[in-house]
Amino acid sequence: METIAEFKEKLNSAVTFIRSRTEFKPTIGIILGTGLGSLVDGIELVDTVPYDQIPHFPVSTVESHAGRLLFGNLRGKPVVCMQGRFHYYEGYSFKQIAFPVRVMKALGMETLIVSNAAGGMNPNFRPGDIMLIKDHINFFPGNPLIGPNDNAWGDRFPDMYETYTFALQDIARQVALEQKLPMQTGVYLGLTGPCLETAAEYRFFRTIGADAVGMSTVPEVLVAHHQRNRVLGFSIVTDMGLADNMHPCSLEDVIGTASRTEPKLRDLIAGCVERM
Ligand code: HPA
């Protein structure tokens, strides 16, 4: 098992390398999900660091993810943006998936904004809806916080009362209202993939209280919460998973809907960042 000292060594070399490439101090971290790469359009770029140059950084294997850290200002706020994230189905460990979240914190991040593409299970949802994540269900077979704990970073047994920061949810609702953007709210269930869900699984996940399902976000949010970041999360509902009304679902559909919905989410996130 990796010791805390070994993990800190890795973290340190990643942070030291990034610091050799940019002095930019971000306070907000943004993780862009599938089909959401161009959310960065509104960012006044200052520096870019490709993942494959950063020591110990995982390298993204999914084609729809670009794989670089972007540093810049969004509505006047210093942000670091992960263009491309890591998924458990790619073969990474939970610690690897969440490693960039530790790195962003070390660079100055106080608030993490996560986005993803998800399958909708709430029958009131439609493809193209944006869902504010109010809570999650960790359906992954693990947790990045398993292993030795550094109490200086966070609690051994983190309380999950306010995983998705209430004040940030309030801001999101206000901004959506001002932008006349209909916004759903719900519970995100994260699981391994890469298979989409069977009808029986959709029925089960709906029954246990999930509104949307996807293959990401939960590991990163667990680490962000552990290290006492504020967290704001959004899903784009790219397709519907209704047990009694199943249709074939292609990756093209998922990416197409995510891309079409992206401008709305971009404006919503920018509006939230402006008020942080
Ligand atoms: N499951 C079903 N539909 C989806 C998913 C998923 O994990 N992600 C995006 N659409």
Image (cartoon, rainbow, N blue to C red):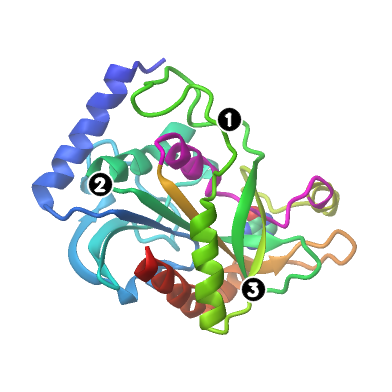
Which residue position is annotated with label 3?
129
**Is residue 259 something that shows in the picture?**
no
Mark 1 or mark 3, which is nearer the start of the sequence? 3
> Which tag is nearer the camera, tag 2 or tag 3?
2
- Residue 111, x across and y down, in percent: 38, 51
Name the quarter where the N terminus is drawn.
top left
Q: Residue at x 21, y 69 (%)?
A: 45
| Quadrant of the image occupied by residue 17 | top left
Which residue position is annotated with label 2?
108
Mark 2 vs mark 3, CA separation in Å: 32 Å
The residue furthest right is 244
Answer few, some or many: residues within 10 Å of disc 3's Cα (few below 14, many 20 plus, some between 14 and 19): many
| Quadrant of the image occupied by residue 253 | bottom right
The residue type indicated by label 1 comes to Gly
The residue type indicated by label 2 comes to Gly
What segment carries the magenta color? 206-228
- Residue 97, x across and y down, in percent: 43, 40
Answer few, some or many: residues within 10 Å of disc 2's Cα (few below 14, many 20 plus, some between 14 and 19): some
State yes or no: Cβ of the residue under disc 1 lies below 8 Å from any atom of ligand 1: no
State yes or no: Cβ of the residue under disc 2 lies below 8 Å from any atom of ligand 1: no
Q: Secondary structure at mark 1?
A: loop
Q: Is residue 230 left or right of residue 180?
A: left
Q: Residue at x 50, y 23 (%)?
A: 146
Answer few, some or many: residues within 10 Å of disc 1's Cα (few below 14, many 20 plus, some between 14 and 19): some
| Quadrant of the image occupied by residue 143 | top right
Quadrant for ligand 1? bottom right
Mark 1 or mark 2, which is nearer the start of the sequence? 2
Mark 2 vs mark 1, CA separation in Å: 27 Å
Which residue position is annotated with label 1?
142
